[in-house]
Amino acid sequence: GVGSGEKLTRPLAIVGARGTLGKAFARLCEVRGITYRLLTRQEMDITNTASVNAVFTELQPWAVVNAAGYVRVDDAEREPHICLKVNTEGAEILATACAQYNAALLTFSSDLVFNGAVINPYVETDTVAPLNVYGCSKVMAEKLVLQAYPASLVIRTSAFFGPWDEYNFVTIALRELSAGNSFVAAEDAVVSPTYIPDLVHASLDLLIDGESGLWHLANKSASAGISWANLARVAAKQAGVSVSSLIALPTLELGLIAQRPTYSVLGSDRGELMPCLDSAISRYFDDRS
């Protein structure tokens, strides 16, 4: 493993400079005084071994956070090759390089590795059975990453929302509802929403502690999970926004291209590291202002 002295002098490399997660890691490394380098695809293309090796040689990072990824679940159905190249091949190339250069690796997976045919929260050891291309890309990535480099930290997470970008479910829901525009959300799909600042802090803690293998990180609501429509209702209630223009529909009526599990709540056998959802939603309002 990496000594604590090296963590002070060598940078943490963060891949995925354009994305919500990459930017959040950079912001919170800043807050925590962790030396980091946020890398664009131009600076390091994880699908290109030579590009990856060049950056490792130059930066000598003590760890790499893979916050890059193909995240458009519906588009993945018509361009699976592109999704697999980034999510699966890219992650494997990165894991192989981390093993070679003795750097820790943190990479992200998804609740969409599961099919939803259960009624209790999924734990790390549960059998995966993805329903869509995106889920398949993540299942294969998990397997190949941990094969190439068993010391990797692979974090499954779910239903992001955060204070710093404009494109997440909670932010869009509040914007549309407060404008009186109709907003459509699934009434039957039960998820465990993940507050990005909490995810980043917990992930960094695990990485710094030298943890490895699969971990589930999500904020728990009182009943373990919450439907998308109820998440919109809870956020609106806290914001003092009317939900009269909310249209709650069954997932099947949303016209989504990729099949989704109707239940994908993440629990954990390894430790509950995340604050509860109510606390996350109230901090969302503080952190946005």
Image (spheres, rainbow, N blue to C red):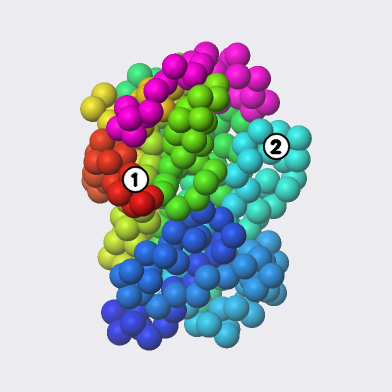
Task: Report if the CB atoms under discs 1 and 2 are less than 8 Å apart.
Answer: no
Say whether residue 270 is left or right of residue 161: left
For the image shown, how many numbered marks are present on the structure?
2
Mark 1 belongs to which amino acid? Tyr
Q: In which image quadrant can residue 49 be found?
A: bottom right
Q: In which image quadrant can residue 200 be found?
A: bottom left
Indicate which disc residue 13 carries.
none
| Within-10-Å neighbours for mark 1: few <14, some 14–19, many 20+ | many
Label 1 belongs to which residue? 284
x and y percentages locating residue 36 in the rendered image: 44, 75
Q: Which residues are magenta?
A: 236-261
Q: Nearer the viewer, residue 92 or 167?
A: 167
Label 2 belongs to which residue? 75
Q: Nearer the viewer, residue 220 or 235?
A: 235
x and y percentages locating residue 141 in the rendered image: 56, 49
Could you say whether the residue bearing mark 1 is in a helix, strand or loop?
A: helix
The residue sitting at 42% across, 21% down in the picture is 243
